[in-house]
Image: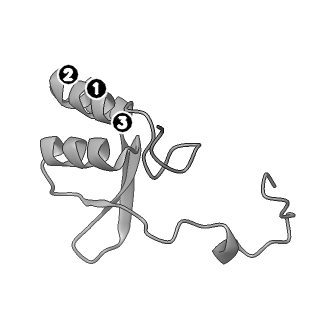
Amino acid sequence: MAQGKGPDTPVHEVMTDDVKYCYEDDDTEDVARNMADIQVRRLPVLNQDKRLVGIISLGDMAVTDEPSTAGAAVAGISQPGGPHSQSGGPRP
């Protein structure tokens, strides 16, 4: 809607092309580091057959893992700019 598209717009016109994800047996520290690098707060979780089995969020990590894992991810995610920011890129 923000781009002037109506409710009849096909999903493929507004969806993310390059979906980031992790696997259910990945180490949470690696996942947190990846979330920080790509600046996202949630990732789809896939099994080895690449079937969706869940979503992991920073909140999940904060309550079930070492607080430092989620904290490190938040620090990276909170950097200005990035491909998933509202501005669409790095800020000057």
Q: Secondary structure at mark 3?
A: helix
Please tell me whether mark 1 or mark 3 is closer to you in this view. Answer: 3
Q: Residues within 10 Å of mark 2 (few under 14, many from 20)?
A: few
Near mark 1 (Cα within 10 A), the count class, few <14, some 14-19 or many ≥20, is some
Where residue 57 appears, as percent x and y from the top left, is: 37, 40
Q: Disc 2 marks which residue?
A: 67
Q: CA distance from mark 2 to mark 1?
A: 5 Å
Please identify the quarter of the rendering in which residue 26 is found: bottom left
**Which one is nearer the viewer's eye here, 44 or 47?**
44
Q: Residue 62 has which mark?
A: 1
Residue type highlighted by circle 1: Ala
Residue in the picture at 14% in, 41% down: 29
Percent position of residue 88, x then y: 54, 50
Using the image as rendered, state which of residue 25 and residue 83 is in the foreground.
Answer: 83
Q: Which residue is mark 3?
A: 77
Quarter in which the N terminus is drawn? bottom right
Is 61 or 54 nearer to us in this picture?
Answer: 61
Determine whether label 2 and label 1 are within 8 Å by CB: yes
